[in-house]
Image (cartoon, rainbow, N blue to C red):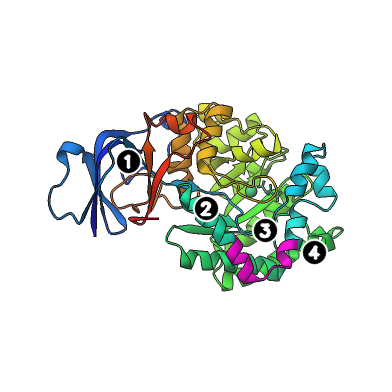
Amino acid sequence: MTKLFINIKELIQVRDTSLHKVSGKEMSILPTIKNAYLLIKNDLIADFGLMNEAPTFSIDKIIDCSGKIILPTWCDSHTHIVFAGHREQEFVDRINGLSYEEIANNGGGILNSAKKLQETLEKDLYNQSKKRLDEVIALGTGAIEIKSGYGLTVDAELKILRVIKKLKENYKIPIKATFLGAHAVPAEYKNNKEGYINLIIDKMLPKIAAENLADFIDVFCEKGYFTVEDTDRILGSAKQYNLTPKVHVNQFNAIGGIQIATKHKALSVDHLEILTDKDITSLQTSNTMPVALPSCSFFLGIPYTPARKIIDANLPLALATDYNPGSTPSGNMNFVVATACIKMKMTPEEAINAATINAAFAMNLSDKVGSITKGKLANFIITKEIPSYNFIPYSFGSNLIDKVYINGNKI
Ligand code: NIG
Ligand code: FE
């Protein structure tokens, strides 16, 4: 089936196959074609160019896009969408003055979500998670990473990863699974963190590898959660199963998480709200993608990742949602892009690059998604009639999406 999209006001993020990420000043360049056509064949992008060069034969369907912009679907490289129930009471508690840390210390936080998830049947967990996935695809997400980490027992962590596996089977968008057993120390191991780490290494990892349930490994490297030494041990053990690290670091404190993640050749380091000069230097000598999660900063009222400092140091930067029940109950990448511009002073070009091509890199999906490139998946957003792509972050509260195409089909 060949579909031709014609009269596209502007086709955004057109790239060569060879480009996998943009760093520093390159991030301010967003290649586009005005008055363009886009040709797709089955599930792939076949060609694109100026409207007056559009093909005129062997087309099954023509779609007129006058006044509309086409851009690649968002890539969300950091989510926790497989969770059970919600934590809106903690949200109210925070309004009334409790901190995220105080709530966690009172048995709320990740442990609260883990309790709910342990009591939830796999099929119910699947149905709850599927709703979230449907919601974010309608909001323009066309590739996603999903973490475990709200199980914290062998059975519950496997339950989450099996749900992710089922989502992979039932959905057309690329989905990557990350094992985050080291998300928090469960209550029964409160005074025996080593015991829990042993459980991760000796029981969880071998089972996950045997069932091929994960692509990546993650650790919440943070004061009160897992130390740099714990992280080193877990990432080191995951190596034998070929699990590449993507690590939660520097959310509240800079404790050396970046150094240990880059030592283990992490694909990404995520959060980075607190970032030292030494961290910047470590990132400069690595191939690791820094990932900012502005919706989390917005929701918790914590500092925003210093995007300017990162980009001005000639580093790349990706953006993701962190969709989870505690720190970011939102999977809206449009909001992430807008917030990055408004609060982190990223330009629209930088933010769109961060949420597409660089975010694809942060999931090892550069060959499939993240740009309008011949041979990549035909996953793209057609906007409503808008004056320019700057309007996307500018008009931050409006839904500007007219249609989302996944694998060449309108959803
Ligand atoms: O990425 N920081 C660690 N994990 C999640 C939040 C966990 C929760 O509060 O449920 C995050 O922000
Ligand atoms: Fe997270």
For the residue pair 83 and 64, the one nearer the viewer reads as 64
Q: Nearer the viewer, mark 3 or mark 4?
A: 3
Does the residue tagged 3 have its C-beta within 8 Å of any atom of ligand 1? yes
Marks 3/4: CA–CA distance? 17 Å
Where residue 275 sits, quadrant-wise, is: top right
For the magenta stretch, what is the residue range? 116-128
Q: Earlier in the sequence, mark 1 or mark 4?
A: 1
Label placed on residue 135: 2
Residue at which label 3 appears = 149
The residue lying furthest to the left in this view is 57
Residue 252, image x and y in percent? Answer: 72, 38
For the residue pair 66 and 31, the one nearer the viewer reads as 66
Residue 129, image x and y in percent? Answer: 58, 60
Mark 1: give few (<14), some (14-19) or many (20+) Cα within 10 Å: some
Which amino acid type is marked by label 1?
Arg
User: Who's the residue at 64% across and 42% down the image?
Assistant: 259
Residue at which label 1 appears = 15
Where residue 152 sits, quadrant-wise, is: bottom right
Q: Secondary structure at mark 2?
A: helix
What predominant SS class does the magenta segment belong to? helix
Label placed on residue 195: 4
Taking the image as shown, residue 271 lies to the left or right of residue 386, namely: right
